[in-house]
Image (cartoon, grey):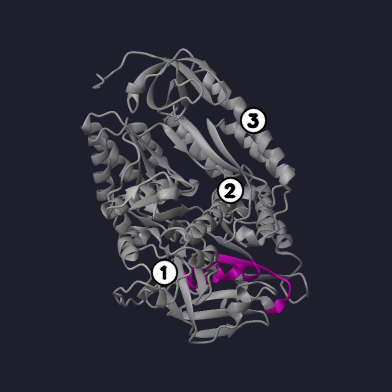
Amino acid sequence: MQAKTHERMTVEVKQAIKIDERFYKVEEIRKLTEDTFSIRMPKGRFKFKAGQHISLGIHGDYQSREYSIYNGENDEFLEVLVKEVKDGYFSPKLSNLKPGNLVEVNGPFGKFRVDEKKIDDHKFVFVASGTGIAPFRSMVRTYPDMDYQIIHGVRYGYEAYDKNEYDPKRHVLCTTGDKSGDVHGRLTKYLKKETFDKSTQFYLCGNSNMIFDALEILKKKGFDRDQVHCEVYF
Amino acid sequence: MKYHLVTLGCQMNISDSERVRAVLERMGYVHTENEGEANLLGMLACSVRQKPIDKVYNKIAQWNRWKDQRNLITFISGCILPADKEKFLKLFDIIFQMSELSQFPDMIRSYGVTNAASLQPKPVMPQNEHIVDLWQIKPKYQSTYEAFVPIQNGCDKFCTFCAVPYTRGREVSRPSGDILAEIRHLVNQGYKSITLLGQNVNSYGLDKEGEEITFSELLRVIGEYGKSSGEEFWVYFTSPHPQDMGREVIEMIAEYDCLAKQIHLPMQSGDEKVLIKMNRRHSMDKYRKIVSDIRELIPQATLFTDVIVGFTGEGDTEFQNTVKAMNEFRFNMAYIAMYSPRPGAASYRWQDEVSQEVKKERYHQLSEVMKIHTRDYNRQMIGKTFRVLINGTDRKTGFSTGLTEGKLSVRLDHAMPELMGKIVDVKITSAADFSLSGELMSLKEKIVF
């Protein structure tokens, strides 16, 4: 609550001291490429399910943005993956954060989550463009034994964020700007060619155009819409 | 001292305004419709569209001019985007979130003080944990037969066209015991139409992680109370989100008489891609399944929806999918809005690529499609008798008007002010696109004059 000053009135001010649990100190900024980085914060009592997202604000700024959680449920920290948008409003400010700076975390939000009942007997295919890989890293770190495959589409090979954390047999990198990936071309090229088990659960995360195209391909392959879970980045 | 309150926007704001009025009147303020004679002027803002925000700016400019002529205190609450809040701080004397309403009297008394809270870091998202304090305040209901009962506040869905998560904060559910107590009180007072309010009513209880009942369980509790009360009343809810709309909710509505057979299920678009771009998190298949469950379990239910035309990415093909969906679901009412980017919402950062002209054209086209179905539905009601809650007067004729349980508008054939707030039998005699006409049949209850 805020009020403006009135000159003629004298009143008592009640001092209320309250620690706001939503403000977190930045612990580490991990540079992954020239324009992509992760922000790590102490996890504290924050609880979430792999695949969920948070709303992140900067102390002193009135805007906020949503970011998928990049770490696993059991990690000791809370982490988000950020790509700096040139001339953007928010991400350049995030890129200037230093350890010790305050950020505001709200959440977790969302239902883009792995169905735990299906983990033991279903195959999971995670399709990501760019930083859309964030929720999938969280899922893989949380359920390392799940039967998964990640199909990650980026422009250049160096954008395969934290690639060495994944089982190489389960990680397919598709690059359009160089030939360093497992597939040269868009991830949809790979998706079209590949065959999948009938009961596969698909998770798509990234920009809307990739999601539209992937949805069409999966629909043509005969998968039901309820087997395909989408999280659009905007 | 007199106060004047301007309420903009949705039913949630109307409900909030009833609590603001209760607080002010408990302080001794007297309400006036004439803002020219009030010393306390306030507004409950709405940020869903630009127009109501423009109204706020116009109104406060006028009020601030009046400060040269008389002593005035101005305040604002409701749905306010952070960017507007920064500006309002300079324009209004007091700004508070609805969750801080219980502290509002202190604010008025200590008007002029920069309080401790303003020295703390300002959260980006509104603090919503204390919304329960707001719900403890007994509202001053504006009607004696229709009431709004908030059951949940805030939104965690982050639809890209909407700024509500940034104005009302995250989802918080009101204790079910309090909800039922308010409903009992209303029914005992003779209320006939009660609307459960929330940004996502069917997410009710989920924020409490097992410590609160779910929405369908809440409906069951209300339904059981309705059954035992022996009273005739209708309980509505708005708005549900298709993502959390399970068959069990529809089963409850089917089972209990007091749960009104009218469902408002926002569709927003009939196109899969546009839904994804809107971040609606439900597919058309999911929506179709819900409608199919409604038709199967409550065939008599009326179905209302919300649709946005001209959203970013909606080309002709996508719009035609919405037209197809309108034909498929044959809504009894669709609140159609032309898309306008809202500061604070994610889509505000995208190009608003559909021209105003095209939006208008689509709006009219879709309205025409809707009319075909509302007209057809209304016509088949002719000759049948329905229970109707009398709740108004036709401006032109002075005849009484009312709403069926399915919220279809009915005009009677003469004025009967003594029936205001009563549920009566009306035989439908003619039908128009959006309304019905009918004649009064015998009353089930004896009216006490």
Give whichever of B417, B447 is nearer the camera: B417
Between tags 3 and 1, which lies in front? 1
Three-letter code for the amino acid on which mark 3 is drawn: Val
Residue occupied by mark 2: A225
Residue B45: x %, y % from top left? 48, 54
Asked if badge 3 and badge 1 are on a common chain, one would say no
Residue B13: x %, y % from top left? 43, 49
Q: Is residue A234 rendered magenta in the image?
A: no
Residue B332, labelled with which disc?
Answer: none
Above or below, B272 against B431 in this view is below
Give whichever of B394, B313 is nearer the camera: B394
Residue A2, labelled with which disc?
Answer: 1
Residue B257: x %, y % from top left? 32, 30
Label 1 near label 3: C-beta < 8 Å? Answer: no
Q: Is residue A141 rendered magenta in the image?
A: yes
User: Which quadrant holds the C terminus of chain B?
Assistant: top left
Q: Quadrant of residue B189?
A: top left
Question: Local crowd at mark 1 within 10 Å, few (<14), some, or many (≥20)?
Answer: many
Above or below, B125 against A229 in this view is below
Label 2 near label 1: C-beta < 8 Å? Answer: no
Q: Indicate the secondary structure of the residue bearing disc 1.
A: strand
Residue occupied by mark 3: B369
Q: Indicate the secondary structure of the residue bearing disc 3.
A: helix
Q: Residue at x 66, y 38 (%)?
A: B363
Instruction: Say which chain tag 1 marks.
Output: A
Residue B408: x %, y % from top left? 47, 27
Q: Indicate the secondary structure of the residue bearing disc 2.
A: helix
Give whichever of A76, B395 is nearer the camera: B395
Give the distance between the C-alpha atoms of the residues marked 1 and 2, in whole angstroms. 48 Å
Range of residues picked out in magenta: A129-158
Between tags 1 and 2, which lies in front? 1
Give whichever of B108, A50 is nearer the camera: B108
